[in-house]
Amino acid sequence: MAFQPYTPKPITDIFTNDTDINRRECRRVVPMRVLALGLGRTGTASLRTALKTLGFDDCYHMMSASVENPPDCLMWSDALASKYDKKGTFGREQWDSLLGHCQAVCDWPAVAFAKELIEAYPEAKVLVTTRDVDSWHASTMKTVNWRATESELKLVSRFDWGAGLYQPMLSKFWHEFWDHDFEKHGKRRFVEYYDEIRSLVPAENLLEYKMGEGWKPLCDFLEVPVPEGLSFPRTNDTDGFVDRCRRRNRMQMMNVLFRATVVGGSLAAVVFGVTISVRRFWRR
């Protein structure tokens, strides 16, 4: 999985709007100012929007790799291999390549590297979003745990450029971080993780934030003005998560079918592929 060579986005990928930036060739262009190290499904997508509104742009999130710039997954895979398999090194230079365009980072898979990021960017402010562990676990079971283990994504990843980068990285992160069983170990790891953050960051330098607290505690901690006339953002709700992922799968399979057509597949092969695609992805 790790150290895969970069491959450019196929020109036939017309049904998705992914960018195609090889982060291995990038360097830091803005300072890293905020490490938002709360676990996913604690409001991290909303926090990302809020941080960008406050001027911490860009703010890295799992969506940065999953639906925005899939080649990022190559470097995340390198980082995971370094941490969990002891293969290669991944330090400040590599973080600056992967996250050099960002002033903030949040969500997974970054949470797997909380200690490493805190050490790499000691000048950055550290905050965590959190919530009740039981409601968090139920939400995550229905969303990201489903996504990390679904057979449909695995199938698409065999043929599609973006999914082929994303799915192996997501699967590796998910199995390693949750001791190979999120349903069984998720709640324990939740408690352990937040305890670890508290042990790494002095209480006076750490903000623990829950959705619903509004702009003021966040802005006070970050030492920026409260936006006037703006409600705190609310995005990435549980109800729409599965539908968005399945739409992504369908669009990626359309890329695959279009590429087969352009490359020169016979009419019979194209019709067969369309039939299989419709059967698997649209009859739900």
Image (cartoon, rainbow, N blue to C red):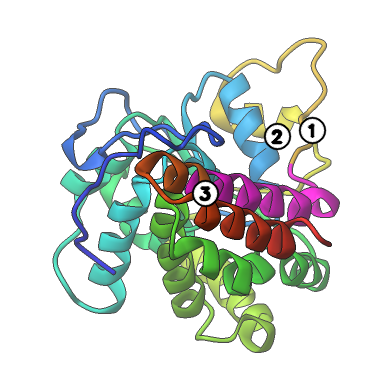
- Contact? badges 1 and 2 (CB < 8 Å): yes
Judge whether residue 243 is colored magenta.
yes
- The residue located at (77%, 10%) in the rendering is 228
* Residue range of the region highlighted in magenta in the rendering: 236-256
Q: Disc 3 residue type?
A: Leu
41 sits left or right of 195 in the view: right
Q: Secondary structure at mark 3?
A: helix
* Residue 112 image position (x, y, % from top left): 43, 64
Q: Residues within 10 Å of mark 2 (few under 14, many from 20)?
A: some
Cα distance between the residues tagged 1 and 3: 56 Å
Asked if residue 208 lies left or right of residue 171, the reply is right
Which of the 4 image quadrants contains residue 114? bottom left
In this view, the residue in front, 115 or 71, is 71
Q: Quadrant of residue 1?
A: bottom left
Q: Residue furthest bottom?
A: 184
Separation of disc 3 and disc 2 at Cα? 60 Å
Q: For residue 16, which quarter of the picture?
A: top right
Q: Is residue 207 above or below residue 77?
A: above
Mark 2 = which residue? Answer: 217
Residue picked out by circle 3: 267
Q: Is residue 95 left or right of residue 231?
A: left
| Circle 1: residue type | Gly
- Label 3 Cα crowd, 10 Å radius (few <14 / some 14-19 / many 20+): few
For residue 214, which numbered disc appears in the image? Answer: 1
Q: What residue sits 34% from the left and 45% below the top?
A: 71
